[in-house]
Amino acid sequence: MYPELEKVGGLQIAINNELEKLNSILRVSDEPELKKIPLTYARIENGQRFSQVYIGAEEKLYLPDFWKEGVCLAHGQTQNITELGQVLDYWLCNNITTNELAEKFNFVVPNDKAIAFDQNKEVEYTWNAILQDKSREELHDFVKLAIKDDVLSKLFPFTSLYTLCFSKCTGYPYDTDNLPNVTPKQFENFAPIMGREFKQQDTNQLGIQFVVAMNKDKYLGSGNAEEALKIVKENMPDNVKPARKGTADD
């Protein structure tokens, strides 16, 4: 399905050829581990932006994604290798929004969160998204309080399995250093957590709704939503600033 790739020796070389035609400064990342999969994967980056490209297995499709400051904001699909080179160059070499990218290339579809990130409202958006997520109902009592808190509401929230975590940055990998996390009591049968063990019947009897820990290895306390919020605040570092754009690696 991909004679143009077989002709030149792989996806990475084919993309570089298209970028050269555009006189682009970009080139596919030249990392040893990526060279092991030349036909099916490529990564292209420039500053705080990067894209990964995969190919379809059952039909001919080039499948790029579009990242900025550690956040995947859009996906695309095209059968045309020339269009692929053009969209990569446009996204990675220009200070454009995700919406501007989609307007120029109709095969690009922004994610639901893209507008919020483009408008610097990603923290507020993500808190509300967790609050509206029915699959995270066990966290809602705590989130309703945290979203009104002057400190917690400025940090970037994300969930890891059942646990609600807080980050000092809005992109992945997240910066959770010295920040507590909150896990709801709903464990299956018998669940060890942070060096403590709870049975479902015990948490019901004690009225425990949430367990608060530090880095999942240090137990800090447990209680209802109000008590959990107090424990979190008591174990926050001094002078916590609002989450910044970027990743923990920046």
Image (cartoon, rainbow, N blue to C red):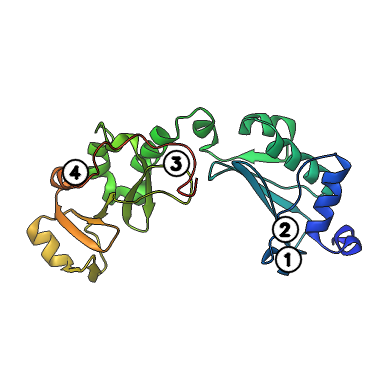
For label 4, the SS is helix
Image quadrant assignment for residue 88: top right
Above or below: residue 154 compared with residue 182: above
Counting residues from the start of the chain, the first of labels 2 and 4 encountered is 2
Q: Residue at x 79, y 44 (%)?
A: 85
Counting residues from the start of the chain, the first of labels 1 and 4 encountered is 1
Q: Amino acid at mark 3?
A: Thr
| Marks 3 and 2 in Cβ contact (< 8 Å) | no
Horizontal side of 241 relative to 219 (left or right) equals right
Counting residues from the start of the chain, the first of labels 4 and 3 encountered is 3
Horizontal side of 73 relative to 243 (left or right) equals right
Above or below: residue 103 compared with residue 126: above
| Marks 1 and 2 in Cβ contact (< 8 Å) | yes
Q: CA distance from mark 3 to mark 2?
A: 27 Å
Question: Which marked residue is nearer to the observer: mark 4 or mark 3?
Answer: 3
Identify the disc placed on residue 229. Answer: 4
Q: Which residue is mark 2?
A: 30
Q: CA distance from mark 1 to mark 2?
A: 8 Å
Q: CA distance from mark 1 to mark 4?
A: 48 Å
Q: Which residue is mark 3?
A: 170
Along the viewing direction, whichever of 245 and 62 lies nearer the viewer: 245
Q: CA distance from mark 1 to mark 3?
A: 30 Å
Q: Which residue is mark 1?
A: 35
Q: Residue at x 23, y 39 (%)?
A: 238
Q: Examine the rendering and report whether any part of residue 12 can be seen.
A: yes
Q: Amino acid at mark 4?
A: Leu
Counting residues from the start of the chain, the first of labels 3 and 2 encountered is 2
For label 3, the SS is loop
